Amino acid sequence: FFLLALSVGAWAIILGLFELPVMDPYAHVLVVTVYLSAILVPLALHLFAITLVSERGLLSLKRILVSFIPIIVAFLSIATPGFIIDSVGGRIGIGREILFGSGYYFFVAFLLGYLVTSLIILFRKYHESAGIFRTELLYVFLSIISAVAVLLVTNLFMPQVGAFGLFWL
């Protein structure tokens, strides 16, 4: 869970730097860094979910490798100029505007795949559990669902149509 909180915190700090007007010369590098850090959030959630359901809280090397292979592909896709992020501009009163490349839908599918997989793992564990652990899992599941709903609307779907007003959420 610490990795999840750390990844969200790092993403928020980088996003804050991206929005600063004094960072104009570094805007493209910062937006790439924002998206690179953004893919660490679903990875941390996924690792949290599979650790929670594994026996004795240990992960096998196979599970770790399977979790990281798509991350490496996503890192390379984000780092490829013009594929996911085409360019960065600015509009008065709105802040930064990101023009997405042809691979943006790959990025959205990647994030949704990790999030949905993690939620399915947690949901299965919830149904297998009993007592106080089941109640704790319900609260974890509901908090993740509510955070993911806000994230999807403000950071994936609204920017796609040019609405960056709530991008910082």
Image (cartoon, grey):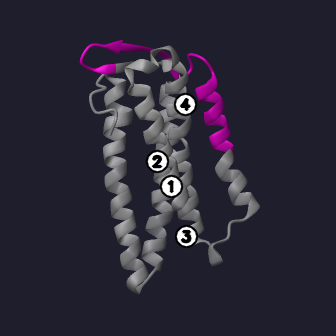
Which comes before the other along the chain, label 4 or label 3?
Answer: 4
Q: Mark number for residue 4?
A: 1
Q: Write down the residue under mark 3.
A: 52
Residue 49 drawn above or below residue 128: above
Labels 4, 3: front one:
4
Q: Write down the residue under mark 4.
A: 33
Q: Which residues are magenta?
A: 69-95
Q: Write down the residue under mark 2.
A: 8
Number of other residues with Cα within 10 Å of mark 4, as a class: few under 14, some 14 to 19, many 20 or more: some
Mark 3 lies on a secondary structure that is helix
Camera sees residue 15: yes
Q: State if disc 1 and disc 2 touch (CB < 8 Å).
A: yes
Residue type at mark 4? Thr
Q: Residue furthest right?
A: 61
Q: Residue furthest front?
A: 22
Residue 164: percent from the left, percent from the top?
Answer: 31, 26
